[in-house]
Image: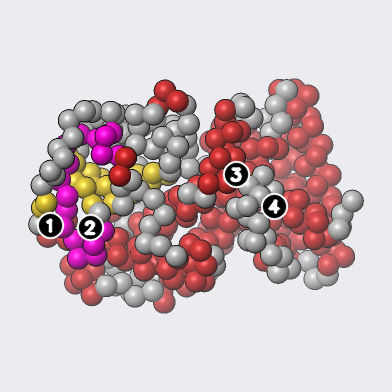
Amino acid sequence: MKIKFFTYLFLLIISVDLKAQILQPTQEEKLITERFEYIRQIKKYVGELYWKNFSTNDFPGTIVYFSDSASYFINPLPEMKDKVSKYSILYNDYDWNIWKLRMPLDSAKFVMETTFQFDPKTKGYINYRTPVLFCSSPELTKKERIKINSTQEWSIALMHELYHQFQYSNEAILTYVLRLYQEKKMIDMDSMQTIYLKNQEFRDTLQRENELLKRAVKASSIEEEKKLFTDFLRLRSKRNLAYFKKKKFWIETPENFWEKLEGTCLMMEKQLKENFKNIKPTEYIVKNDPMYEPGFVFNESDPSEKNFYTELSDSIPYVGATGYNMVQLLEKNKVAYKDNFFNYASLPLDLQLKYFYKIK
């Protein structure tokens, strides 16, 4: 998730049709709604599997879906009517509110991201102080991202962003991150990864930290876990202090936040992949979706799939791996980390583990 403005976002245009035309869906548009019914079913399944509240509503916020010729607002907020150009209402079998808009000429070729704005100057944007999920169709995604070749792979990528939208839809989380940005105490995950890649000492220490977390996950006793995690905290504290002395910025504040959100999101994603074969798509998807792949399964024995979540990588923000490994420790010890996850937005994963291990 990134907080930035894309050129395809819709600016304030006072040309709203108060009597929007109601359209019957084309065959392509019927497929769009069936794909999102499939997403809704996946969301419900993984919510029951990992995080109960994730399955309590159809969608946690507005989704903007891009085809090659139009954009579709699914579950738009009422106030967005004053922020978009003329739209039509798309009839669908699920009683969802869907707006159809023309595709802007400067639209991006590919997007799969949850974004929001916080600067008062961006009040005219549809994602001002509200997380909006922007996603390309599976067809557009396949053109730009070779690794996503099926509706099932596309749905996993979308579920990752949908989970972030669920997290940011919580008022405490959204208020906390907005405050951090306003106080200039926050940087995004890409910026943090740049720091990781360019600062050799920072990078080397983080690799040692992550190895300690992985060893703690595999430890056979609570005493060994505690010792390894204590070493992890000591290393982390030294790294954060060294960075502050050089840059006069506490990197631990954004680090803690992104580990919390990205680590739990990756845990959701991993559990979903392991159980994906149990989720049955609608009959319409099976018969009519050209990108649906019959017999599709995730290869859980693939080393790259196993290491994706636990290992540091140059191409993926490091907070994902460190966050995921801490969530593994919380899950391993049945720590009730979900209970105060939202209410205490600033409470990091490492502090919950420190409390659990009773480290002074």
271 inside magenta stretch: no
- Label 1 to label 2: alpha-carbon separation: 9 Å
The three-letter code of the residue at mark 1 reads Pro
Of label 1 and label 2, which has the lower sequence position? 1
The picture places residue 217, in percent across and down from the top left corner, at 72, 63
**Element on which disc 2 rests:** helix
Contact flag, marks 1 and 2 (Cβ < 8 Å): yes
Can residue 95 be found in the magenta stretch? yes
Label 1 sits on residue: 25
Q: Position of residue 201 (x, y in %)?
A: 74, 33
The residue that label 2 is drawn on is 32
> Quarter of the image holding residue 214?
bottom right
Whether label 2 touches label 4, CB < 8 Å: no
Q: Upstream in the sequence, badge 2 or badge 4?
A: 2
In the rendered image, which residue does mark 3 sit on? 258
**Sooner in the amino-acid sequence: mark 4 or mark 3:** 3
Image: magenta residue range: 80-96
Q: Position of residue 239 (x, y in %)?
A: 77, 36
The answer for how far apart the CA atoms under marks 1 and 4 are is 46 Å
Work out whether 102 lies above or below 233. above
SS type, badge 3: helix
Q: Which residue is mark 4?
A: 349
Q: Earlier in the sequence, mark 1 or mark 3?
A: 1
Residue positioned 75% across, 27% down in the render: 244
Specify whether 18 is left or right of 296. Answer: left
- Identify which amino acid the numbered label 3 is placed on: Trp
Q: Is residue 261 left or right of residue 45?
A: right
Residue 58 pos. (x, y %):
37, 62
Mark 2: few, some, or many residues within 10 Å (few <14, many ≥20)? many
Discs 1/3, front: 1
Who comes first in sequence, dot 2 or dot 3?
Answer: 2
